[in-house]
């Protein structure tokens, strides 16, 4: 490797958390960052990735799934259709095959340089300096999504474009992934191809979406459980990642079609980037960021998303919502056919077979609460306890309980929201009053307690799906969530109950908690048009 070059295979670029109790080679301990080669060779010794930014974590997992399938010989079903068994053979071996790992990285070593002047850097387009205005680069603050750039607000730190702090190569590597998967739509740096100049990009494939990943007791187990079986017609030598392709993509033609899981999860970027290193190739001093395909958007295909259907019949991924707890998605993760709803959620394909690796798997949810264009709100990183033993394919007898637990929790959350808003509108005698302040306080009181209630009852579920040691009992479960809603409602509305008008509004709207509405006569008495005067004293 040339002096000063930065190759992701060998250079420390991925933060990891090692298993406790591992012997260290010297007093210095185990490294916090490892290269891709060491990561795969020692995945059985690594507990998990330690990537702080959720969108970078979600993107990196997809890259690692593709690498794992490549080195483990799991790129196609094979003539015997024994992909499942071959994955189990790798699992029983206890580690990824070292010879195949070494052979893979020898073959593609030149494609893993993060910086390659005059060559082909990893997941970048070396043509951008000729196709973009050299005086209109993006700058490092725009590259690092947690930094403010231009007139954007600050998240974690204050930075200025006039005196930016240069990110390390490992930081830039993860930010490169965030742009490929979560990059925004809208105006970008101008790029000229075949005499036509344009400056508009399409949103990345995971923008606004929340992805779900099975997680084991080691990174090795996590990577194997996260593999998606290739379709029967997938040919391994055709299902290639971008760095395995012989030629760079043509930005003036439609995007390449995916040929299987590996290309589906690594070759769907809508952005083209090029990192510009400093003199030592240890930091990034600038970057080009622009569109990858002119006026074309790849179909959104991904096996780690919950897919829903709109009223117009359009398929879309369940959006990342920082205000929505992970337990509310659990039935859509465990069940092939979750309880019917207007959105008709579909289980992520990865969970069809993940339990074959282990029943003791958790679910990790990773995403970015953001809009399609520039606005970013919050990272989402959440995990469940061990739950995949309850997956429908593993034990269908638990299906009714898992679905109904979530339904009861959400039912009384919706009723509480409606009740406090109705109480506020009646109290102020303004039908247009939205009661947002009361609704927010009620939600803050109800949902955390509802989550605790859900997991308490979920842990007690017997594999038979029957009541076990006070486990799932529909009547008791309904009463428990109703009681949580009642407590939240009373706490929020109590300040206005000291007046006749307030007490009447609160008592009548409270009926919404039970799924009933005030009578016509009672509703008329709460109308903003009612002429009843407030007594004094």
Image (cartoon, rainbow, N blue to C red):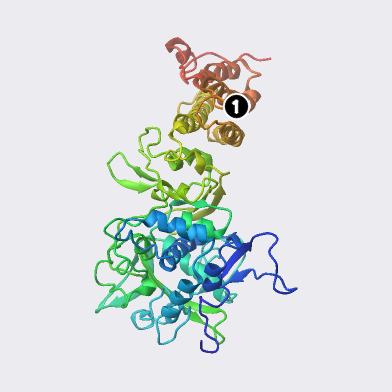
Q: Is residue 91 visible?
A: yes
Give 236 or 508, whichever is nearer the viewer.
236
In the displayed structure, 226 sits above or below 321; it is below
Tell me the crowding category of disc 1: few under 14, some 14 to 19, or many 20 or more residues within 10 angstroms, Cα based: many
Q: Residue furthest bottom?
A: 3
Q: Give the residue displayed 56% in from the left and 48% down from the top.
A: 383
Q: Give the residue displayed 24% in from the left and 70% down from the top.
A: 253
Q: Give the residue displayed 39% in from the left and 62% down from the top.
A: 74
Q: Is residue 185 left or right of residue 533?
A: left
Give 164 or 488, whichever is nearer the viewer.
488
In the displayed structure, 441 sits above or below 264; it is above
In the displayed structure, 129 sits above or below 83; it is below
Residue 439, quarter of picture = top right
Residue 261 placed where, x, y %? 36, 59
Residue 247, quarter of picture = bottom left
Q: Could you tell me which secondary element the residue under label 1 belongs to?
A: helix
Residue 120 placed where, x, y %? 40, 81
In the displayed structure, 458 sits above or below 524; it is below
Tag count: 1
Residue 35 placed where, x, y %? 55, 73
Q: Is residue 261 left or right of residue 479?
A: left
Give 96 or 361, whichever is nearer the viewer.
96
In which quadrant is the C terminus drawn? top right
Give 18 or 61, whichever is nearer the viewer.
18
Question: Mark 1 sits on what residue?
Answer: 484
């Amino acid at each position: 490797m040339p002096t000063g070059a930065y190759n992701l295979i060998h250079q420390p670029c991925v933060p990891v958390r090692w298993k406790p109790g591992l012997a260290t080679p010297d007093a210095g301990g185990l490294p916090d960052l490892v290269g891709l080669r060491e990561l795969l060779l020692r995945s059985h010794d690594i507990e998990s990735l330690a990537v702080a930014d959720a969108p970078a974590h979600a993107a990196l997992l997809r890259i690692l799934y593709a690498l794992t399938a490549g080195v483990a010989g799991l790129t196609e079903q094979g003539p015997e259709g024994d992909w499942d068994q071959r994955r189990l053979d790798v699992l029983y071996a206890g580690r990824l095959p070292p010879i195949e790992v070494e052979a893979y990285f020898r073959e593609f070593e030149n494609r893993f340089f993060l910086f390659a002047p005059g060559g082909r850097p990893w997941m970048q387009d070396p043509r951008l300096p000729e196709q973009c205005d050299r005086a209109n680069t993006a700058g490092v603050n725009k590259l690092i999504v947690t930094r403010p750039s231009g007139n954007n607000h600050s998240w974690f730190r204050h930075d200025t474009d006039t005196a930016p702090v240069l990110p390390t190569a490992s930081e830039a590597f993860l930010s490169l992934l965030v742009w490929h998967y979560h990059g925004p739509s809208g105006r970008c740096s101008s790029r000229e191809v075949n005499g036509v100049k344009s400056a508009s990009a399409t949103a990345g494939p995971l923008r606004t979406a929340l992805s779900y990943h099975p997680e084991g007791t080691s990174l090795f187990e996590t990577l194997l459980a996260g593999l998606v079986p290739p379709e029967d017609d997938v040919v391994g030598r055709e299902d290639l990642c971008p760095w395995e392709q012989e030629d760079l993509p043509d930005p003036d033609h439609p995007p390449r079609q995916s040929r299987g899981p590996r290309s589906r999860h690594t070759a769907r970027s809508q952005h083209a980037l090029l990192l510009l290193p400093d003199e030592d190739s240890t930091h990034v001093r600038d970057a080009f960021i622009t569109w990858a395909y002119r006026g074309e958007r790849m179909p959104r295909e991904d096996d780690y998303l919950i897919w829903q259907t709109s009223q117009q019949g359009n398929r879309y991924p369940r959006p990342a919502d920082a205000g929505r707890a992970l337990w509310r998605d659990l039935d859509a993760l465990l069940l092939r056919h979750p309880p019917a709803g207007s959105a008709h959620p579909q289980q992520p394909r990865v969970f069809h077979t993940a339990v074959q690796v282990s029943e003791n798997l958790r679910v990790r949810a990773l995403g970015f609460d953001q809009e399609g264009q520039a606005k970013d709100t919050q990272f989402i990183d959440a995990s469940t306890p061990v739950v995949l033993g309850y997956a429908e394919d593993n034990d269908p007898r638990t299906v009714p309980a898992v679905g109904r637990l979530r339904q009861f929790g959400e039912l009384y959350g919706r009723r509480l929201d409606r009740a406090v808003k109705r109480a506020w509108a009646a109290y102020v005698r303004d039908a247009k009053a939205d009661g947002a302040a009361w609704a927010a306080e009620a939600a803050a009181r109800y949902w955390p307690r509802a989550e605790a209630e859900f997991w308490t009852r979920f842990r007690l579920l017997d594999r038979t799906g029957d009541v076990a040691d006070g486990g799932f009992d529909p009547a008791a479960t309904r009463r428990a969530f109703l009681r949580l809603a009642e407590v939240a409602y009373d706490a929020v509305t109590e300040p206005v109950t000291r007046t006749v008008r307030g007490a009447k509004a609160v008592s009548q709207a409270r009926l919404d908690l039970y799924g009933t509405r005030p009578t016509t006569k009672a509703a008329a008495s709460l109308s903003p048009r009612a002429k009843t005067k407030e007594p004094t004293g």
